[in-house]
Amino acid sequence: MRVMTWNVWWRFGGNWRERAAGIRITLETYQPDVVGLVETWSADGTTQPDVLAGHLGMHAAFAPTSLPPAPDPVEEPGQLGATVGLGLLSRWPILRTEVRELPHTERPGPPPTALIGTLDHPRGNLHVIVTCREWEPQYAADRAAQTMALAELVTDPAFDGPLPVLLIGDLNAPPDEPELAPLRAVTVDTWEAGGGDPGATTLDSLLPYAPLEATTLIDRRIDHVLVRPGRPDATVTVRGAFIAGDRPIHGLYPSDHYAIGADLDP
């Protein structure tokens, strides 16, 4: 089972239309079974996950979130009326979805969310959580509370079963950040388990549109594929881990983040 997550940079940068082909081509190349999309969009009666699913022969779901906030005022006409959200792509039918609000006592505005999808995997229900965690240092209490909420969510006994539970997305933190400890304590980091390079980054300062102002996140691996066994007596086998979207396509990098993925049993 190939699982990926990718922050696809919404409709930022003034080149989102041109970048769309690179996102599609990358996913076509890697042929994932499950993809969590962060900073994806909904607009004009459709969503980016639905558009990608149509090209890839997959199933799609979308949920609005408040991280990052949409620009106000808009930076270009294509952002007008577009919603920032989380997306899920699946090789298997999506049986149901749920949206959970995450704590946010400090940042004003609507709450950030986690998108939960239950997939009709041949071996049983596969539960996938897609999310984006607060990144700004001044909202440290939100960052900590969201980590605890996600740790509680991924260990919910309602998700127990024959398959592992996946938590994927942009956690806006490198793996060694102390605030991530509660989440790492209850999950397997597939990058480490799959033999990934400890120095890998998903937010590369060499990208032409890298957010260099994010000094605590730049040149770090802040996007994650985390997993926990479906039962206490089960184990998770990670066959390998990889970075994708790290080359320009038609002269453009597809996003300001690289995608990250892992190959798991089953």
Image (cartoon, helix red, strand yellow):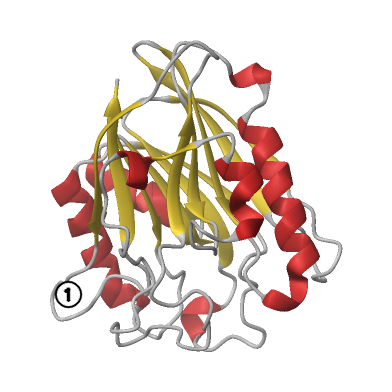
Task: Answer with the quarter of the image where residue 104 lies.
Answer: bottom right
Task: Answer with the quarter of the image where residue 178 lies.
Answer: bottom right
The N terminus sits in image quarter: top left
Residue 99 to residue 214: above or below: above
> For the residue carrying disc 1, how many other residues have a C-alpha within 10 Å: few (<14), some (14-19), or many (20+)?
few
Residue 249, horizontal then vertical, whole percent: 15, 72
Tell me the element at label 1. loop
Query: Horizontally, is 203 left or right of 250 in the view?
Result: right
Q: Nearer the viewer, residue 105 or 228?
A: 228
Per the image, the residue denoted by label 1 is 248
Q: Nearer the viewer, residue 23 or 133?
A: 133
Residue 246, horizontal then vertical, whole percent: 22, 68
Residue at screen point 66% across, 57% down: 179
Query: Horizontally, is 131 left or right of 2 in the view?
Result: right
Residue 20 to residue 197: above or below: below
Q: Nearer the viewer, residue 48 or 81?
A: 48
Query: Horizontally, is 81 left or right of 170 in the view?
Result: right
The C terminus sits in image quarter: top left
Amino acid type for the residue under numbered disc 1: Pro
Q: Is residue 64 visible?
A: no
Residue at screen point 65% across, 88% down: 73
Residue 12 to residue 161: above or below: below
Query: Horizontally, is 142 left or right of 155 in the view?
Result: right
Residue 32, horizontal then vertical, whole percent: 26, 40
Residue 11, horizontal then vertical, whole percent: 45, 74
Residue at screen point 79% across, 70% down: 107
- Total labels: the figure holds 1
Q: Is residue 207 visible?
A: yes
